[in-house]
Structure formats: structure tokens, C-alpha cells
Amino acid sequence: MDIASLRSRTGRLIHTHSSAYVPHIRGSGFSCARCGWCCRNNFDIKITQDISRPSNAISIFPDDIRRIIKGTGLQWDEVAQPDIYSCLSDGDNIWAIGWILQRNDAGDCIFYRNNECTIYEWRPMICRCYPFFMGERDVEVMHCEGPGNEMTQERAGEMARILKRYEIKKLRSYIGIIGQLGDRLSFASLRALPCNYSGDVFVCDGERISNVRLARC
Ligand code: SF4
Ligand code: SF4
């Protein structure tokens, strides 16, 4: 997607009242069962012939990381790692497209412990929106153990507002990242880093470019 179409999509979202999404959200009957399915490593999603992305490789904004750091006292690299499943190589350097939450050796979110989210109050925006995401025309619902219950109008309205905020932020973040990557951005050079990768990675997150040295991943 190019910057012009991202801007036009952002504009459309800004001018759509979040109440437009309420019927679909409410109709799902979502109520979080706190089963942790979305926090755990369940399956891989094939992005390209060579890239398989774990279902819970959770993309997060710098704002999410700062909020978690403020709430937990953890360091940046204890919360997040470069998105090793969305990297580009320009022949000289590796460029990661944003950050994902750290995961443990089993591949589960590092904050999922004893069957609960230990940072619930500070959890990333994407976790607040799950299982909803904005499709091309309307809200879509991802796999979840929660739908099928009663959902109040107020709760659906709150979810619609969060989802709209998240989508606008995501689109603006993409615009920033495309600007940072410039000519390096090419689907053909998209790759995932091997598990034993060690070396420098430059992370473009739409705000700044960070140089991260990975010892292993
Ligand atoms: S959002 Fe859905 S999958 Fe995730 S913990 Fe709640 S019920 Fe389970
Ligand atoms: S931050 Fe919390 S809600 Fe989000 S994936 Fe991790 S444990 Fe689950």
C-alpha cells in the first residue's frame, strides 16, 4: 500500500463515526473468556514462501512500549524486540518493520503467566482490540473463544472507539515507516531473520530508527 492510499484510508476512518462499527461488534456477542488463546503461540501464518509468522507475534507501537515500561519498570528490550518476521535487507543492513512483544521460550507472550495477562492495565492497543480488526469494508472478527455471549451497547461502543483509534494510529504508523524505509521498501526483499541471527538490526517504527544488536533470536 502506498502513502496516498494510506492517507485516504486514514481520512475515511477519521470521518466515520465509531458508532458505525457498533452493530457488527455488538452482534458478535464478544465477552473475553480470559482463556489466553490469543496470547499463546498457536500456529504459524504463511506470509510468503519463506516467511511463517507465529499467530501471536504481536506488533506494538512505541507508545505501547513506553506505557508498559512506565507501568512495570522493565527496560525497552525486556518488553519488545524488532519484528524479526518483517525484515528487509538492502544488501548492507537489515531493517525491521516495527516492534513485537517479547515472547518466552515456548513462544507465548512473555507477559502471559499463570493463565493471565500480568500487564492487563498497560497492555498494548492491539490486545485491547482483539478479536476485532478493521477489514476493507467493516469490522472483522478473528479466532476467539469469547464471541457468542451478550454484549451491551456501551461495551460495544467503547470497543468501537478503541478500534477506530487503533486503526488510525496503525495507518499513521505505516505512513511513518514507509517514509523511513524509502526505496528500501520492496515486498520482494521481505524476509524473516533466522533463529540464530546475531548482528545489528535497524528498526523503523514510524517515530525513529533504532539500532538494535541482536545476540540471538
Ligand atoms: S480475546 Fe478471545 S482468545 Fe483472547 S483471551 Fe479473550 S476470549 Fe480468549
Ligand atoms: S500483553 Fe497481555 S493480552 Fe497482550 S498478548 Fe501479552 S498476555 Fe496477552
Image: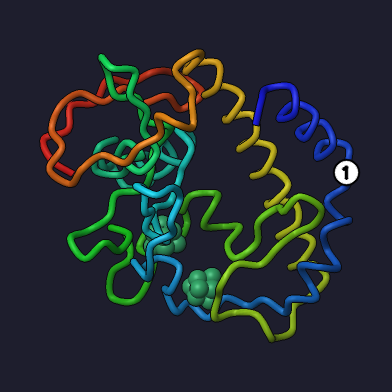
Q: Is mark 1 within 8 Å of ligand 1?
A: no
Decide if residue 122 is in sight here. Answer: no
Rendered location of residue 39, percent (x, y): 40, 65
Q: Nearer the viewer, residue 58 or 18?
A: 58
Rendered location of residue 214, percent (x, y): 17, 33
Vertical order, 8 against 116 (above or below): above
Q: Which residue is mark 1?
A: 16
Rendered location of residue 2, percent (x, y): 66, 25
Q: Give the side of residue 24 with respect to residue 68, left or right.
A: right
* Element type where label 1 sits in the image: loop
Looking at the rendered image, the quarter that the C terminus falls into is top left
Category of crowding for the residue at label 1, using alpha-carbon neighbours closer than 10 angstroms: few (below 14), some (14–19), many (at least 20) = few
Vertical order, 127 against 151 (above or below): above
Q: How is the image coloured?
A: rainbow
Rendered location of residue 75, percent (x, y): 25, 37
Determine which quarter of the picture holds residue 31.
bottom right
Residue in view at x 24 percent, y 43 percent: 78
Q: Amino acid at mark 1?
A: Thr
Residue in view at x 67 percent, y 76 percent: 30
